[in-house]
Every structure is written in structure tokens, then in C-alpha cells.
Amino acid sequence: MPDVKLPERPADAPVRIEPLPDLEFSLETLPPKMPVGQPLASSAGPEKGADRGPETLPGIDPEFGVDDFDDEFTESSVMAINVEHDIDPLQADVEQVVVLFANGQDAAARSLLEGFIRAYPGSEGKRLWLLLLDLLQILGERAEFDRCCVEFAERCETSPPSWREHGFKVRSTATGGVLALQGVLTGDDLRPIEQLKRLLGQSGELLLDCSKLVGCDDIVAGVLAECLIAVRRAGKPLRLVGAESLQQRLDERLKPGNPEHEASWRLLLELLQRQAPQAHFEERAVDYAVTFELSPPSWETLPKSVSQPGATSPLDDACYLSGELKNQRFEDLSKYLASHEVAILDFSGVLRLDFFSAGQLVNRLVPFKAAGKDIVIRSPNHLVAELMAVVGLNKQARIIVPKS
């Protein structure tokens, strides 16, 4: 192969490096105010009293300012990033924490909060303090919660929130206690059922209000069934109130021949034992035996102290939710929203709302809000409320956060 001689570059031709295609940036584009290579001012500096102008680096135009940069470079595709220069750093920190919490990263969220509250002195960091105190409640750390309440009061110069229990309300009467279960109870938080066990161990009559109990998973159903069975066998006075709706939902959901949700079947049979005709109980007992190949419970005539229905005023006409709402689509909400002029979604018993469920709740509320429905989300904890704002739920409903 013959040698091929490349043409020589002229000696005075400068080496030109092509700029990136999306950055129109080279020294040749700058106005030639100062020749390249001009030395810097003497290190000895100007004489005393002389007018000292700004020092410049070689090849840099001292008159090329921020406005020139905006004019020449912000049209570049590399620089065309929509940056909100006035973003609130506190809001950014809050959003980071609530997203971590929504994803179940409690330790990471707590670590950030404990650092953030030191960065915002006084009442400026109140939002972060409230997030931390709610997180400690959810984690069940009462001693640490009480300690932080003292520091919160000192720093924010206001009263701290009080410790709350989730998923149930307890009050006393002259003859005994009243326990109101509410929302959807899951095995992630068994505190309502543990409270029921404590009350059943005390003397006196217990009124169990289930009028706001929307549902429960198999773990809670099994424990609740065991409690009711033990009370019935011991002859302890118990008045069951408002359980008809729960019984009806279980009755409709549990199908014979499908060997799943055995614990929920036991709860259904116990509710039928207490408040349904014997024929209906025996029909579902046969379904249970066929489905699970187990001997069903037998019908028993209950003493009046056990079977006596109770009367209590309902808490209100809100739709109660509780526990950890994960991967929820909220299909059941449509019926409630359609039938109420003012729809109140009570989140006082909700511990956590994950990001997927928050987005699904937005989708569920949008058509009702567009139709002029007044929707109120009541008493979410601060972690849940801040996430709701992040996903835009505050545009679909009024969110009322408790003051304490």
C-alpha cells in the first residue's frame, strides 16, 4: 500500500476545538475586551490611594455579567432545567420526611427529623417537631414522646400535643366501660383489641360499640372472635352495639366453598349467634363445615346479660378509616361519597397512608369534587396531612388537622 502523505497544517493556523453542540460556548464568542494571555496585575498591588478595580483572569471579560449569561446560555438544552429558585427549604425538608415515612422507612424519617429540628430554631421548626411527635406516637415510644414534649414547649413556646390512642375510643359509665371500635382494623396495629382484652378483664359491664367499625383483616377478626366467644362462655355482661353492618359485610363477602378467611368466618358465626335468627346461623354453620371440613359451633341460647342489645348514640355520620392504609383503592368510598352532601372522612385512626393509596384517594375524590361535593378529611396526623398536601389532596378536600 503506497504511503499517503497528509497535508500539513499551516504554521499560523490556530487549533480550534469544537464546542459541545448544545452549549454555544467558546472564547471566540466573547467580546475581545482583553487580549488572551495578558498578565495579571503585579503582586505588589496598586499604590496606596489608587483606584483599585476588579482583578480579572486572562481571557475573561469583566463586563460580561449575569444578564449576559442569561441571554447567551439559558437557551441551551443543557441549561434548560426548570429550577424553582425560591423553593422553601423547610417545605423541601418536610416533603423528604413524609415521603420516607409513607414508604415505611421510619428509622430514616426519624433520623432526618432529629437533625432538622436542630437546624430550625424556635417556632420556625414547629412543623418538624409536630412530625416527630406524631412519629413517636405511632412507634409507641411514650417516654421519648414525653421528653420531646418538654423540649417542644421550650423551643416553640406553646403547649405540646397530647398522647392519643388510635382505632378506638374509651369512656366510662356508671355500670362499666364503653369501647368504640372504628375504621378498618388490621394486624399492623392491635392496640384496639388489646384494649378490649383489658376492659374484658375488669369487673362490670362492657358496652362494645361497633357502629363505626368498617371492617377488619383476618388477624383482627380471629382475635375479636376469640374475645367474644370467651365472654359468652364465661357469661360476662357484654352489650354489642352497631355490629349489624359489620355482620352484613362479612355475610356478603364470605362465600361457601372458598377455603379462605377462616378467622373471619368464626367472627361471622359469633355475630350471628348474638344477633341473628337461629335458622340463618345454622345455614352459615353448615357452609363453614363444608368449606373447611371442620365441625361448626352449635347454636346456644344466650343469657340476657350477654345478648341484651345496647343503645348508644353514634359518634357521627362520618366515614371512619384506621390503621395503615397501604395499596388501597378506596372502592367502598364511592357509595358513601354519593350519599352524603357533606362527606366527612375521619382519619383520626389512620397511622400511615402510603404514596399509592394517597394517589388513589385523589382519583376517587376528583369526580365528586368536580360535581360540587363538599368533602372534609378530618383529623389526620401531621405525617399523613403533609403527604396529602404533597399529592394535591388539599385541592379536592378540606383537611382539618387537630390542634393537639
Image (tube, rainbow, N blue to C red):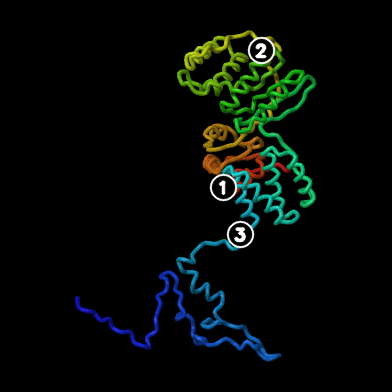
Q: In which quarter of the image is residue 210?
A: top right
Disc on the earlier residue, 1 or 3: 3
Please identify, in this view, whether the residue under mark 1 or under mark 2 is nearer the observer: 2
Q: Mark 3 points at which residue?
A: 87
Q: Which residue is drawn at 56% across and 74% down?
A: 66
Q: Name the image quarter holding residue 380.
A: top right
Q: How crowded is mark 2: few (under 14 residues within 10 Å), some or many (20 or more)?
A: few
Q: What element carries label 1?
A: helix
Name the N-terminal-most of marks 2 and 3. Answer: 3
Whether residue 381 can be seen here: yes
For marks 1 and 3, give the CA distance. 17 Å
Residue drawn 64% across and 22% down? 242
Q: Residue 233 carries which label?
A: 2
How busy is the neighbourhood of tag 3: few (under 14 within 10 Å), some, or many (20 plus)?
few
Name the residue carrying label 1.
391
Residue 74 position in % (x across, y down): 50, 69
Q: Height in image: 275 above or below 160?
A: above
Identify the amino acid type marked 2. Answer: Arg
Q: Residue at x 57, y 18 (%)?
A: 266
Q: Which of 396 and 385 is in front in this view?
A: 385
Which type of secondary structure does the marked residue at label 2 adopt? helix
The foreground one among 68 and 143 is: 143
For the C terminus, give its image quadrant.
top right
Q: What is the three-letter code of the residue carrying label 3?
A: Ile
Crowdedness of circle 1 by 10 Å Cα count: few (<14), some, many (20+)? some
